[in-house]
């Protein structure tokens, strides 16, 4: 029995010393940053303003929805944190304000349900630059020359997003420490 205990102790010691510092990626290491947008009141641009009933859905290459962002399914928020695609130079989102589902008076029949609220579509374009972080962490993507536009096809005279302004002319996204864009609504 003593041999088994000694063998286990030796395996634990060898296991601890066989990992090199570069084999583990610390949680504090910066990885691919997400886009941070702060929402402000269009009539008082210095005042932060919540977006009520906010639902954000990604849009795929075919123009179809690809799913609701986990933390943005009918919430109130003044800060939007959006992941950008690392496999393309463009990301699209549907930003739906005052989102709700109307059951059309038939709560047991979902086939006639429809959504209510106001949806605007934004397109985010950028130039990707993959940067080597370390052997353990691999690469991260830095997004350069980031620009956001409100989709022209969505212009139906009821846009709730009045404008989106950049913090810098050549906006670079490589950390999430502060806002990259300001959304006025």
Image (cartoon, rainbow, N blue to C red):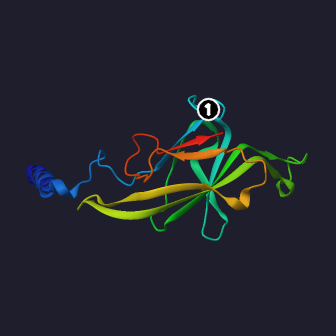
On the rendered image, what quadrant is the C terminus found in? top right
Residue 93 in the image, given as x and y percentages of width and height: 61, 56
Residue 154: percent from the left, percent from the top? 73, 57
For disc 1, the marked residue is 49
**Residue 83: x %, y % from top left:** 49, 54
Most foreground residue, 102 or 47? 47
Residue in the picture at 46% in, 41% down: 179
Horizontal side of 163 relative to 12 (left or right) equals: right
Q: Which residue is found at the position 46% from the left and 68% from the top?
A: 87
Above or below 109: residue 162: above
Give the answer, above or below, for where 179 lies relative to 135.
above
- Which residue is farthest front? 169
Measuring 75% from the left and 47% from the top, which residue is drawn there?
A: 118
Percent x, y of residue 176: 41, 44
> Element at badge 1?
loop
Instruction: Please tell me in which quadrant of the rendered image residue 47 appears.
Output: top right
Return the residue found at the far right.
Answer: 105
Residue nearer the viewer, 70 or 42: 42
Q: Relative to residue 142, is residue 164 drawn left or right?
A: right
Please tell me whether residue 142 is drawn above or below residue 36 in the rendered image: below
Horizontally, residue 145 falls left or right of residue 47, namely left
Foreground residue, 13 or 96? 96
Task: Please report the residue visible at 86 percent of the width from the left and 49 percent of the height from the top.
Answer: 108
């Amino acid at each position: 029995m003593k041999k088994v205990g000694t063998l286990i102790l030796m395996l634990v010691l060898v296991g601890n010393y066989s990992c090199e510092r570069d084999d583990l990626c610390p949680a504090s290491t910066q990885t691919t940053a997400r886009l941070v947008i702060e929402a402000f009141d269009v009539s008082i641009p210095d005042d932060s303003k919540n977006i009520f009933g906010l639902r954000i859905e990604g849009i795929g290459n075919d123009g179809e929805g690809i799913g609701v962002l986990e933390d943005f399914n009918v919430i109130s928020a003044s800060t939007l944190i959006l992941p950008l695609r690392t496999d393309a130079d463009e990301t699209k989102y549907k930003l739906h304000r005052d989102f709700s589902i109307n059951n059309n008076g038939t709560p047991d029949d979902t086939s006639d349900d429809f959504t209510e609220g106001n949806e605007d579509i934004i397109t985010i374009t950028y130039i990707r630059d993959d940067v080597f972080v370390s052997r353990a962490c691999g690469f991260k993507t830095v997004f350069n020359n980031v620009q956001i536009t409100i989709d022209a096809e969505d212009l139906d005279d009821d846009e709730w997003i009045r404008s989106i302004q950049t913090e810098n002319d050549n906006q670079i996204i490589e950390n999430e420490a502060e806002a990259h864009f300001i959304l006025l609504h």
